[in-house]
Image: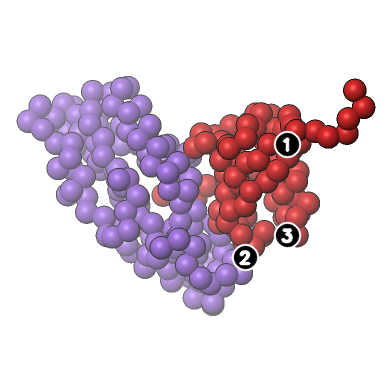
Chain colours: A red, B purple
């Protein structure tokens, strides 16, 4: 096999609070080569304009539950990048 | 709905959990403070990852009710709040006070630890900052999506 094509997966990224301000948007679609983890998605986001202000290992939620950066992504996932929580 | 866009009423929460068998009711109110880090705060704006915040609040209530013989109700404001307004309210009712206090304390601590809610502080000097990240807020528009 010499093919250079790799399958990609697409996830929906949600940004909140200060992180939405850093990247200038609150939501985007991200296509990543398979297989991909949350860490890969964050690394891609950090390469965007303003993305260097995101921490390397931000708090993340995958499909409404907090998950570690090593968690794998599947196409159609909703990945939320969460700034430090400040409720209460 | 645990997230509210209008003023919170503690009486409404107590009414959700009180019963003839529950002789102890403990409650907590978190109010908007007029200072932070030595600076004067004039108002706060809360925003949330709403579906996850609702799910986390439901989990917190279920955990407290599983752990203690009690009923727990809670609510958190979203949007712009003035100093002195109630930002978060918890009521826990139990046959005895120990469990009511314990469940109430658990709920407020877990809200602060787990629920995806953020706030911007508006200072009297015109500065606006995200609490927790310390980042200066560059946008003055509404961030609550409403």
Q: Mark 2, mark 1: which one is toward the viewer?
A: 1
Say above or below: B5 vs B89: below
Q: Residue at x 56, y 60 (%)?
A: B130
- From this viewpoint, is residue B127 visible? yes
Residue located beneath label 2 in the image: B136
Q: Are marks 2 and 3 in contact (CB under 8 Å)?
A: no
**Residue B102 image offset from top left, x and y in percent:** 31, 31
Q: Residue at x 59, y 45 (%)?
A: A12
Secondary structure type for disc 3: loop
Chain of the residue displaying label 2: B
Residue located beneath label 3 in the image: A50
In the image: residue B75, left or right of residue B41: left
Q: Residue at x 57, y 70 (%)?
A: B139
Label 2 and label 3 in one chain: no
Say above or below: B114 vs A16: above
**Residue B98 image offset from top left, x and y in percent:** 25, 28
């Amino acid at each position: 096999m010499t093919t250079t094509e790799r399958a990609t997966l697409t996830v929906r990224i949600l940004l909140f609070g200060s992180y939405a301000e850093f990247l200038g948007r609150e939501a985007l679609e991200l296509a990543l080569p398979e297989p991909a983890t949350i860490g890969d998605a964050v690394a891609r986001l950090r390469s965007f304009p303003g993305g260097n202000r995101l921490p390397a290992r931000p708090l993340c939620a995958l499909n409404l539950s907090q998950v570690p950066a090593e968690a794998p992504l599947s196409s159609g996932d909703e990945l939320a990048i969460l700034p430090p929580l400040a409720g209460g | 709905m645990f997230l509210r866009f209008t003023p919170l009423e503690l009486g409404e929460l107590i009414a959700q959990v009180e019963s003839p068998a529950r002789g102890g009711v403990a409650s907590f109110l978190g109010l908007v403070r007029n200072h932070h880090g030595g600076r004067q705060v004039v108002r706060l704006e809360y925003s949330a990852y709403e579906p996850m915040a609702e799910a986390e609040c439901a989990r917190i209530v279920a955990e407290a009710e599983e752990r203690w013989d009690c009923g727990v109700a809670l609510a958190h404001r979203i949007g712009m709040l003035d100093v002195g307004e109630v930002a978060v309210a918890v009521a826990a009712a139990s046959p005895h006070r120990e469990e009511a206090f314990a469940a109430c304390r658990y709920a407020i601590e877990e809200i602060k630890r787990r629920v995806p809610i953020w706030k911007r502080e508006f200072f009297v000097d015109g500065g606006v900052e995200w609490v927790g990240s310390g980042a200066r807020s560059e946008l003055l528009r509404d961030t609550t999506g409403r």
